[in-house]
Image: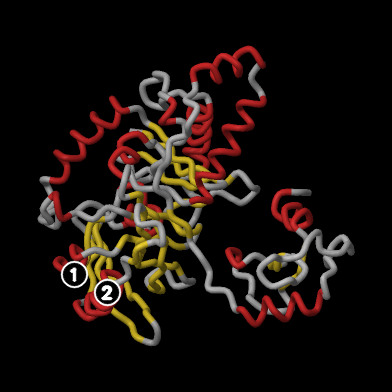
Amino acid sequence: MIGVVKFGNGYSVFDSLDSRLDFMVFTDGQAPRSSYKTMEFWDKYEDKVYKAIDNLKNGICPNCGCLLNVSQVFKAPCAKCRDKDFQVRKTMEKKYSYYQIPIKKRNLKWMIISADSIGIKLSRTLLEFNGNLIAYSFDWFFKQSEIGNGGSRLIRLKYGADYYSAELKSQAIFWDEKLSEVIREELVDLENSFIPFPDPRNVISEQRFMVFERTTDEDRYLIKFQKFTKVYSMVDTKKVQKKSDELDSNGQPISIEEYNERLREEIFKSGNTNKKERLARLKMAPRKPASFVAYSLQYKRNPDVIVEVLERAKGICEECGNPAPFIRTSDGTPYLEVHHIIPLSKDGEDTVENGVALCPNCHRKAHFGN
């Protein structure tokens, strides 16, 4: 059963019943990645992978050829094929003893953090079983397809200066109880971080993920914990969850960055349709937009870096050389924005040397211009 999921600047293409077909294909010039050490299977599956991606772009299910609905333009297969696939995999699960975790206890909330790291949402289930199942679409990360059904592989997980042993199975991971104690401490901190917003109708909550990061040693992974902020509306959260289709492949809220990428693609599609069709859609569109829950990965900025960069600029944009466009009402200082030359998301440093003070126009240009 072929699956295709749009992830940021690339596509994940996999076959849930044939683990050999499992690739990440990037659209920004990066080489395709597979769940294997080498690309020995790429020549065999290349045509099949690109055909599946083209089908998704054209709104066609890569399995049965039916038209995908609007909510599925970023993932396939269609609902009918997914139901069929679920029944097949449900039958397969009964064969293996490590699927003894009750269905309600299976934490499959995995998320791609980067090309070399993925994360699983923290929950009490991870403590109860010292591990959990791994979603089928994440087989490529741990190279589980090399293990085989019923097999296992020992790996080491490094957190800080300590190492913990773990066992990989074909669709699960289980680790040392000592690592569960570390997770327990993170959960206690997380459960105390549900803080009300100034607006009593909204609350802010953290989602914390345990992130696995690959190293040059295929049997060693780095562990860290990352926080994601979610805003819930106490008034219409249930309505939002029912109406919104802004979800990832696991049915979880997407990141703000991923939503913006989707929006840019939709704007591009709208610009390539004729005006008559666009006006017809506008007549049918609701006047008030639906809301949805999203999360955002934030970096803790050093305030000293910001102050030093702004002082160095002396109110002059360091790109165009023009004075700041206006004065801040809060403190009367020239309004400039501190931009990182090498973005923090691309492992840039939060230092004065990597910072530059820009006017709003130049800042937008740095992010979206040529």
Q: Is 123 on the left-hand or right-hand side of 228?
A: left
Looking at the image, do the residues carrying marks 1 and 2 touch, with CB atoms under 8 Å apart?
A: yes
Which residue is pictured at 35% across the width and 40% down the height? 240
Q: CA distance from mark 1 to mark 2?
A: 7 Å
Residue 74 located left or right of residue 131: right
Looking at the picture, tell me which residue is in the foreground, 355 or 21.
355
- Residue drawn at x 37%, y 43% as measured from the top left: 249
Check disc 2 and report the residue beneath it: 183
Rendered view: 321 above or below 301: above
Type of the residue with mark 1: Leu
Q: Position of residue 31 (x, y in %)?
A: 59, 50
Classify residue 251 as left or right of residue 106: right
Image quadrant occupied by the N terminus: top left
Identify the residue position indicated by label 1 in the image.
Answer: 127
Q: What percent of the width, then of the height, locates residue 96?
A: 13, 51
Local SS, label 2: helix
Image quadrant assignment for residue 317: bottom right
